[in-house]
Amino acid sequence: MPLRQCHVFGLMANIVKQVESQLGQANFRHIQGIENLEEEGLKKLGYYRGFACPHGHLIRDSDGHWCYECAKKILSNVCGFDINYLHADYKHKYAKLWKLVKVGFPEDCWEMEIPGGGTPKRVCLPSYRSSYSKQKSENVNVHKALYQCAWGDVGALVVTRLCGNSKCANPLHMVSSFNRNYPPASVTPLEIDFKAEKLMLFNRQSQRESGIQPVIQQEFKNMITHPEYVKDRPEYNE
Ligand SMILES: [Zn+2]
Ligand SMILES: [Zn+2]
């Protein structure tokens, strides 16, 4: 294992502990068949249907506003996305942002640069607040934005950059309190270019009741752990 990677992994455990002691650990509750629950049922369980996350999910935690499906993905240690399948309100904004990133090897820092020099600090994107604020978009920290694209939407929770490099955009160098393990070996899938075929598939699926999720699941090739397995892990609170 390269030295830098060891260093980053070593830091991870400490920083996750720090984040948790400051903010408390987000309390994920797995609910069988949650997608079929009405608002009243969700409310009793501490969830609600809010503004769509970048991945098109709707159910969020009432306190932390993190996305239920995204939390499940992060707890399963899955980091990856396909720009073509992101929700329509995020797709083009994220495509623009990823164009500034020099994607490198998984263990390296991927530095960002704005044309003409400098590093973007904040980016205008929708958030969980979009369902009740007048503006649909707000300024989000650039590293939190990238984290939410690659890992998942953590709502009001904090995202920390482990490598300390303020220019770094590598999602494997970022954690929220849902990250408990060593990160996966790579960001998979990592599709940052628009493909006409996939965009057409997205549009077609969006008009169907099943939506785009079955297509995304197929791309992840069963990487998302079955909830029963997640449940057995110590970081899973119920
Ligand atoms: Zn989500
Ligand atoms: Zn880095």
Image (cartoon, rainbow, N blue to C red):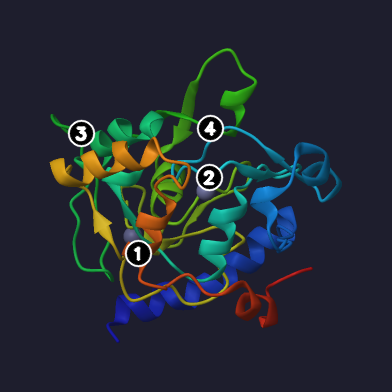
Q: CA distance from mark 1 to mark 2?
A: 16 Å
* Residue 57 circle label: 2
Q: Is residue 236 left or right of residue 195?
A: right
| Label 1 sits on residue | 218
The residue positioned 47% from the left and 77% from the top of the image is: 182
Mark 4 residue CB less than 8 A from any atom of ligand 1:
no
Residue 218 percent coordinates (x, y)? 35, 64
Q: CA distance from mark 1 to mark 3?
A: 34 Å
Residue 160 percent coordinates (x, y)? 51, 54
Q: Quadrant of residue 28?
A: bottom right
Mark 1 residue CB less than 8 A from any atom of ligand 1:
no
Asked if disc 3 and disc 2 are in contact, CB closer than 8 Å, the reply is no
Q: CA distance from mark 4 to mark 2?
A: 12 Å
Amino acid, disc 3: Ile
- Asked whether 144 or 89 is in front, the reply is 89
N-term mark: 4 or 3: 3
Circle 4 — which element?
Answer: loop
Where is 129 relative to 133, above or below? Answer: below
Mark 2 residue CB less than 8 A from any atom of ligand 1:
yes
Amino acid, disc 2: His
Whether residue 185 can be seen here? yes
| Label 3 sits on residue | 114
Looking at the rendered image, the disc whose residue lies closer to the viewer, 1 or 3, is: 1
Circle 1 — which element?
Answer: helix
Asked if disc 4 and disc 3 are in contact, CB closer than 8 Å, the reply is no
Asked if disc 4 and disc 2 are in contact, CB closer than 8 Å, the reply is no
| Label 4 sits on residue | 127
N-term mark: 1 or 3: 3
The residue positioned 64% from the left and 50% from the top of the image is: 35
Crowding around mark 3 (Cα neighbors within 10 Å: few <14, some 14 to 19, many 20+) is: few
